[in-house]
């Protein structure tokens, strides 16, 4: 339950356009998830993907790519992950490089 609340808070702040606040909430959620769930939990990967999206929107492409790659690493060890989520994460992991080069 606490994981969901943290996730919804980070997403709602991002939707409101408060990206600096969103990054702080996302990092706090990720820190708590790492402590509570461990390094290989799919919920941690989902939070890392949200952080990557926020960072890409802020133009922090290297950080976004790193967070997306961490999420992919976790999901690669997961029994089942929605293919659409994997595709979105892979695209985000590579898109910042293409955007920075443009």
Image (cartoon, rainbow, N blue to C red):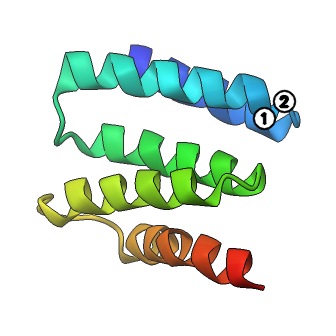
Q: Which residue is mark 2?
A: 18
Q: Horizontal and vertical percent for residue 60?
A: 67, 52
Secondary element at tag 2: loop
Tell me the residue that label 1 is attached to.
19
Q: Residue at x 46, y 22 (%)?
A: 29
**Which residue is found at the position 11% from the left and 60% from the top?**
77
User: Does residue 1 appear in the picture of this structure?
Assistant: no
Q: Whole-percent x and y of residue 48?
A: 44, 44
Give me the C-alpha separation between circle 2 and circle 1.
4 Å
Q: Is residue 17 left or right of residue 19?
A: right
Residue 43 pos. (x, y %): 33, 39
Report if residue 66 is visible in the image: yes
Residue 90 figure quarter: bottom left
Residue with the most extreme right position: 17
Other-residue count near label 1 (Cα within 10 Å), few / some / many at <14 / 14–19 / ≥20? some
Q: Residue furthest front?
A: 101
> At 45% across and 75% down in the image, what residue appears?
84
Residue 22 location (% of width, % of height): 69, 29
- State yes or no: discs 2 and 1 in contact (Cβ < 8 Å): yes
Q: 4 above or below 35?
A: below
Mark 2 neighbour class, 10 Å CA radius: few under 14, some 14 to 19, many 20 or more: few
């Amino acid at each position: 339950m606490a994981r969901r609340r943290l996730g919804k808070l980070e997403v709602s702040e991002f939707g409101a356009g408060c990206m600096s606040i969103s990054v702080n909430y996302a990092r706090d959620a990720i820190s708590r998830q790492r402590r509570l769930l461990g390094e290989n939990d799919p919920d941690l990967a989902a939070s890392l993907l949200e952080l990557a999206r926020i960072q890409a929107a802020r133009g922090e492409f290297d950080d976004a790519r790193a967070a997306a790659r961490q999420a992919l690493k976790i999901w690669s060890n997961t029994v089942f992950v929605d293919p659409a989520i994997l595709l979105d994460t892979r695209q985000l992991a590579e898109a910042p490089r293409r955007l920075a080069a443009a």
